[in-house]
Image (spheres, helix red, strand yellow):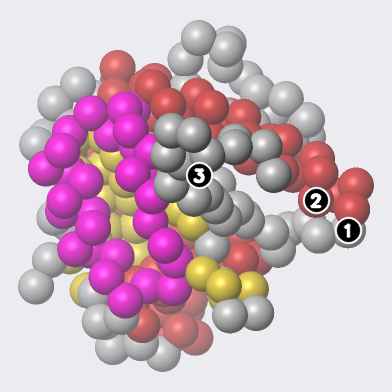
Amino acid sequence: MITIGILGTGRMGVRLARMFGRVERRVILGSRDIKRATEIVEKLGLGTVSAGTYEDAGSADIILPAMFLRDGMLETLEPLRDYFDDKVYIDISNPFNDTYTDFILPWDTSGAEQIQHRFPKTRILGAFKNVWWEVFDEPIFGETLSDVFVVSDDAAAKETFSKLVENTPFRYIDAGKLSNARTIERMTLLSGELGQRYGYFPRMNYKFLGEVWTPGQSAIV
């Protein structure tokens, strides 16, 4: 059975561990404080999720760091560099500042691309960037599955990810190349602003809708 190592025990890391554990994926929830990880795993009560250190999680088949770039994520992961070679790295990060009002990166890059630059031997795949943490608690909106946009330059990584997320409560959209993370990350910032303005924040997500257009059909309805 493939093991996914989640590094970080914040609100995203714990929720993703729970989601994967519920669909019978083996998860190592890694923390710099093993006591904290153990307490969280005990509360989750899922036999598929175990507690470990960052090193334990980094040794898993697939890795998913649940940290912020602004908090020194790249520096925290640097000692684990050798663990990451040739593995699929699921990047969920957004380069928000500490007030969630802007980014710490310029417009011509993304968090995903910065991670790929730092760890060039790792197979970076961006996912869950557009999903705010509270959505994982109640992921279905009425009868509607919301979307997760998936980006990578590695087709095999997308295939691996597709199998990993089977039976999880989202629809997964292939959003193309890794650099498209620039747009997705900024869409997420916009959704946060809109959600707070209209009272949805933080339980809100996207649904990509469309119909097949054929020549001669009006594009304006």
Dot 2 amino acid type: Gly
Residue at 50 percent across and 44 percent down: it is: 129
Horizontal arrangement in the rendering, residue 27 relative to residue 221 (left or right):
left
Whether residue 31 is visible = no
Residue 64 shows which numbered tag? none
Identify whether 36 is placed above or below 113. Answer: below
Judging by the rendered image, the residue that carries numbered circle 2 is 195
Dot 3 amino acid type: Lys
**Cα distance in 3D space between marks 3 and 1:** 21 Å
Observer-nearest of 100 and 38: 100
Dot 1 amino acid type: Gly
Q: Classify 10 Å Cα crowding around label 1: few (below 14), some (14-19), many (20 and above).
A: few
Instruction: Answer whether labels 3 and 1 touch (C-beta < 8 Å).
Output: no
Residue 199 shows which numbered tag? 1
Q: Classify 10 Å Cα crowding around label 3: few (below 14), some (14-19), many (20 and above).
A: many
Whether residue 177 is visible = yes
